[in-house]
Amino acid sequence: MTAFILYQGQKIEIPENTKIDELANALKAMQNSVAYSWVTLNLDGPDPKRVRLMVGPGIPIGIISDPLDGHEPNVTDDSLRDFMNGSE
């Protein structure tokens, strides 16, 4: 499965062995803190790179993955209400 972080308009591939749910929870915790933190990704490929992303309040970041991480989409009013309220 290929997954990406969307950061400042750039798609950055997430390393294969990364657990997406754990990464999402860590990013959420960083976003909810009052301090800024760094997320470091070591990218493989013909030209390996280390990418450091600053994460914290007010910095937009997203995760794009397919195929739905094994979850079925649920866009009922109840699920959207939970999402919009920011509840777990």
Image (tube, helix red, strand yellow):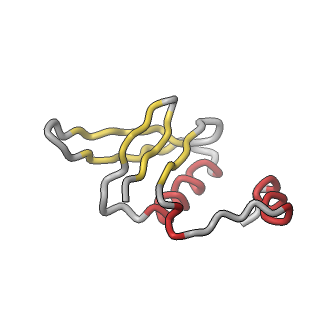
Height in image: 54 above or below 75?
above
Compared across the picture, whether 49 is left or right of 18 comes to left
Where is residue 73? Give x, y as percent: 65, 63
The front one of 42 and 36 is 42
Q: Which residue: 26% across, 47% down?
A: 42
Location of residue 39 in the rendering, given as x and y in whole percent from the top left corner? 41, 47
Q: Is residue 27 above or below residue 6?
A: below
What number of labels is visible? 0
Between 47 and 34, the one nearer to me in the picture = 47
| Quarter occupied by residue 57 | top right
Quadrant of the frame with the N terminus: bottom left
Viewer-side residue, 40 vs 77: 77
Identify the residue at horizontal 14%, vertical 39% (top origin). Answer: 46
Q: Quadrant of the C terminus?
A: bottom right
Q: Nearer the viewer, residue 30 or 75?
A: 75
Residue sitting at the far left: 46
Residue 58 lies left or right of residue 41; in this view the side is: right
Q: Position of residue 47 (x, y in %)?
A: 16, 36
Residue at screen point 64% across, 46% down: 34
Compared with 65, 9 (above or below) is above
Q: Can you give x and y, in whole percent of width and height, for residue 78 in the image?
A: 84, 65
